[in-house]
């Protein structure tokens, strides 16, 4: 790892992650734009579900590409570039008159920049923080739904007053400013990145393929249900008979629940074995799917989606914390990129299927049952994860 004489300021690195990740996290508030975009561009719900799904593909591409950019430029320059690209993508989405431009702007540019920024900022912070890495990783992950929690009501208000195009234009401006601020904070923090990550893969003893596969599946099964809720919460609640105002308020509350759960999931991993935390989290989400299947009512839908979101949030924080338990800090970027491919696959499976089933049936009942079956399988797989790090020295590195 490169030696640097510059002073390091962990608080500034964490603040840099906070400033840019919050507006990037508005990707989770995409459901607020469903109806106005449908009306303006004349596209179906399943087509818009694909926009969100493809955005996660871009996100994963950015995450996995980021470690290979470590030697290309300084961390501050890379972070600033991510902010510019993300702003450009949302700007294109704001002026899009066709489906292809919407995909290019929102899914390709915005999604890819968000993934790269996440790895760059979190990897830099992880190398500086010496303890409670589970809490740190859970916190940074929590910023995504946190951004949606702030953005959803603002977007709903702005959509009604100015239209969705002006709302997206405002988001583009916010991303540009946040990118510059985050870049300055990254420089001020003295952030550095692990050079060996750009040069090659992990050593054989660091790969732990069986653990990686189990963690991948545990996260995938939770994310499939969680991303369906995040991307279509307003539509789901409306389908169960809820009013539009109720759906918007519930979307905000659910994203807030997920945000808090991500912090809690990371915090719990610092104190309890990963398999226990992950198994219980899937069980919480399963409870939500069972309740909503038995009692398909508007109020029950809000509570049930909150439980599904709570379980997904706990799994998200647990997964990020689990990476810091099972692998050394310098490997975070590469391992996270592989594990979070599960998030990408999840986003283009059940959320897209949910949109298709809605177009066919006008409801989400079958989708909820499928999500519950995934939670059952997730509990089984999670119970087989290692209870502690295979390489104990990693935790102290």
Image (cartoon, helix red, strand yellow):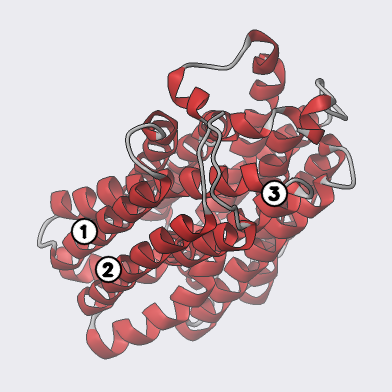
The kind of secondary structure element at disc 2 is helix
**Callout 1: 10 Å neighbours few (<14), some, many (20+)?**
many
Left or right: 259 in relation to 76: right
Q: Residue at x 27, y 77 (%)?
A: 170
Could you say which disc has been placed on residue 172 in the image?
Answer: 2
Task: Please identify the residue farthest to the left as the structure is shown.
Answer: 97
2 and 1 marks in contact (CB < 8 Å)? yes
Task: Note whether residue 384 is visible.
Answer: no
Left or right: 215 in relation to 149: right
Question: In the rendered view, would you say 149 is above or below 102?
Answer: below
Left or right: 11 in relation to 83: right
Task: Please identify the residue farthest to the top as the structure is shown.
Answer: 204
Task: Please identify the residue farthest to the front as the structure is shown.
Answer: 5
State the CA–CA distance, disc 2 to disc 3.
Answer: 31 Å
Q: Dividing the image into 4 quarters, which one contains the N terminus? A: top right
Task: Note whether residue 204 is visible.
Answer: yes
**Callout 2: 10 Å neighbours few (<14), some, many (20+)?**
many
The kind of secondary structure element at disc 1 is helix
Q: Residue at x 44, y 74 (%)?
A: 151
Residue nearest the observer in this picture, 397 or 262: 397
Q: Earlier in the sequence, mark 2 or mark 3?
A: 3
The kind of secondary structure element at disc 3 is loop
Q: Residue at x 76, y 58 (%)?
A: 264
Give the number of the mark in front: 2 or 3. 3
Q: Dividing the image into 4 quarters, which one contains the C terminus? A: top right
Which residue is disc 1 drawn over?
Answer: 88
């Amino acid at each position: 790892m490169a030696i640097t004489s510059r002073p390091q300021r962990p608080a500034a690195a964490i603040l840099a992650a906070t400033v840019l990740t919050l507006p990037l996290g508005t990707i989770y508030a995409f459901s607020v734009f469903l109806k106005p975009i449908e009306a303006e561009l004349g596209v179906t719900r399943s087509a818009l579900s694909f926009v969100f799904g493809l955005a996660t593909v871009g996100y994963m591409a950015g995450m996995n590409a980021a470690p290979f950019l470590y030697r290309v430029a300084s961390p501050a320059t890379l972070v600033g570039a991510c902010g510019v690209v993300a702003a450009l993508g949302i700007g294109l989405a704001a002026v899009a008159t066709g489906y292809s431009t919407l995909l290019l702007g929102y899914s390709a540019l915005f999604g890819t920049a968000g993934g790269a920024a996440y790895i760059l900022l979190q990897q830099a912070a992880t190398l500086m923080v010496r303890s409670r890495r589970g809490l740190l990783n859970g916190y940074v992950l929590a910023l995504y739904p946190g951004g949606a929690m702030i953005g959803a009501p603002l977007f709903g208000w702005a959509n009604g007053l100015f239209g969705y195009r002006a709302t997206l234009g405002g988001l583009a401006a916010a991303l540009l400013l946040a990118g510059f601020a985050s870049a300055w904070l990254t420089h001020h923090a003295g952030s550095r990145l692990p050079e060996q990550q750009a040069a090659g893969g992990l050593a054989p003893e660091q790969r732990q393929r069986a653990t990686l596969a189990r963690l991948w599946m545990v996260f995938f099964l939770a994310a499939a249900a969680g991303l369906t809720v995040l991307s279509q919460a307003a539509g789901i609640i409306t389908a169960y008979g809820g009013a539009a105002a109720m759906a918007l308020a519930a979307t905000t509350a659910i994203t807030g629940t997920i945000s808090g759960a991500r912090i809690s999931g990371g915090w719990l991993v610092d104190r309890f074995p990963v398999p226990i935390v992950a198994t219980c989290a899937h069980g919480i989400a399963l409870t939500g799917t069972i309740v909503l299947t038995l009692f398909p009512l508007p109020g029950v839908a809000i509570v049930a989606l909150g439980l599904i979101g709570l379980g997904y949030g706990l799994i998200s924080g647990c997964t990020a914390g689990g990476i810091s338990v099972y692998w050394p800090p310098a490997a975070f970027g590469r391992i996270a990129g592989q594990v979070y491919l599960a998030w990408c696959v999840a986003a283009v499976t059940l959320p897209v299927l949910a949109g298709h089933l809605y177009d066919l049936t006008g409801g989400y009942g079958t989708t909820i049952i499928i999500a519950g079956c995934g939670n059952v399988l997730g509990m089984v797989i999670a119970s087989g994860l290692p209870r502690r790090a295979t390489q104990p020295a990693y935790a102290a590195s």
